[in-house]
Amino acid sequence: MKYFLSSIPYIINTRSDGDLLKKLLDDPYPVLFEGIHTTFLASHPDLSGKTLILRAHNIEHEYYKGLYKVEKKISKKMFFLTESVKLERYEKKLNKKLIIAAISHTDADYFRHGFTNVIHLPPFHPYEKLHCQPGLGDYILFHADLSVPENIASALYLAEKIFRKLPYKVIIAGKNPGSDLIQSVSQFPGIKLIADPPENEMNELIINAQINLLHSFHSSGIKLKLISALFNGRHCLVNPEMVYGSGLDDLCYITKDPPQTLTLIDRLMNLPFEFDEMEQRRNILSENFSNIKNARIILDIIK
């Protein structure tokens, strides 16, 4: 209960540890805070002599506000709203000497209003090369962590507004789908839900799909499922929020409403994925989403 009554956000307060400060002071090395939820000690005066870097995954209070909007249960809805308010206040009190490594261009622009040292550092990912397959697939895939409220809302939205109207095979895949989602999707015979596929099976689903259709209700950060689809899949069809600030617009087909999406699906289901598209992806992804290049950015900060 003390965590909920505190002015410090729950995701930060519950990650404090009495021994951590001592461990951080045992050596002279820089500290990389992986996400704002790890920054309980970021403003501690004893760390003022260290290089402190915050890897900002997104604009966290906006993310929680988005969760509030799509959550159905009142208790969780109020938690997300309260957490969003606390996170926005907390961010304004954060150590201004923090080096902010923002994950997208738009996030970097946002943080520059409150911090003096902000860089753009794209996300790290497990892909060293493209695994896209040329040619045609025979199904549409939506994949996500199906335990996250926003992803559940996207899956239900797509099922109702898009998927049920299609003559094509549709697969929704992801971990931990709840009973409500399973029951809702079961009403549409053209949609197959695959729960908790192993990593290798999920990769095969992404690679073999004709269209990886991705959807988001908020635009903060960069979605790693988008990176996965571009490194591994064929055509990538998204809504504007999915690519906002990512620099990946040219690699995706972007639609703003269901009628436009349905029209474009009809086109893409009969459009082979070609080698020139693969080459365009390779050029852009190797330039901006190279793990080696982005690791050097961190090394340059440390040096």
Image: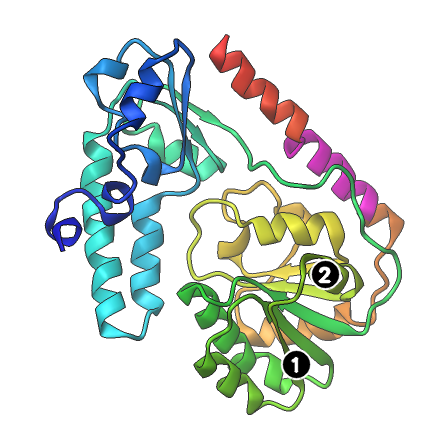
Looking at the rendered structure, the secondary structure element under dot 2 is helix
State the residue position of label 1. 192
* Whether residue 116 can be seen here: no
Asked if residue 282 is among those painted magenta in the image, a careful observer would answer yes
* Spot occupied by residue 198 in the image (x, y as percentages of width and height): 67, 62
What is the basis of the colouring in this image? rainbow
Asked where in the image residue 289 lies, by quadrant, the reply is top right
- The residue range painted magenta reads 278-290
Up-down relation of residue 213 to residue 139 (above or below):
above
**Which of 300 and 197 lies nearest the eye of the viewer?**
197
Residue 291 occupies which quadrant of the picture?
top right
Q: Residue, x 55% and y 15% (percent of image)?
A: 299
* Residue 241, percent from left and from top: 48, 55
Residue at image location 66% in from the left, 50% down from the top: 228
Q: Earlier in the sequence, mark 2 or mark 1?
A: 1
CB under 8 Å between discs 2 and 1: no
Figure check: 264 above or below 14: below
Q: In percent of the image, x 48 and y 61: which residue is there?
A: 216
Query: Would residue 106 be seen by someone viewing this image from the given angle?
Result: yes
Q: Where is residue 62? Give x, y as percent.
A: 32, 50
Which one is in front, 96 or 20? Answer: 20
Q: Is residue 281 left or right of residue 43?
A: right
Q: Mark 2 points at which residue?
A: 206
Image coords of residue 211 (percent x, y): 72, 65
Q: Main secondary structure of the magenta part?
A: helix
Q: In which quarter of the image is the N terminus?
A: bottom left
Q: Horizontally, is 285 left or right of 220 in the view?
A: right
- Sort mark 2 into few (<14), some (14-19) or many (20+) by Cα contacts within 10 Å: many
The residue under label 1 is which amino acid type? Answer: Lys
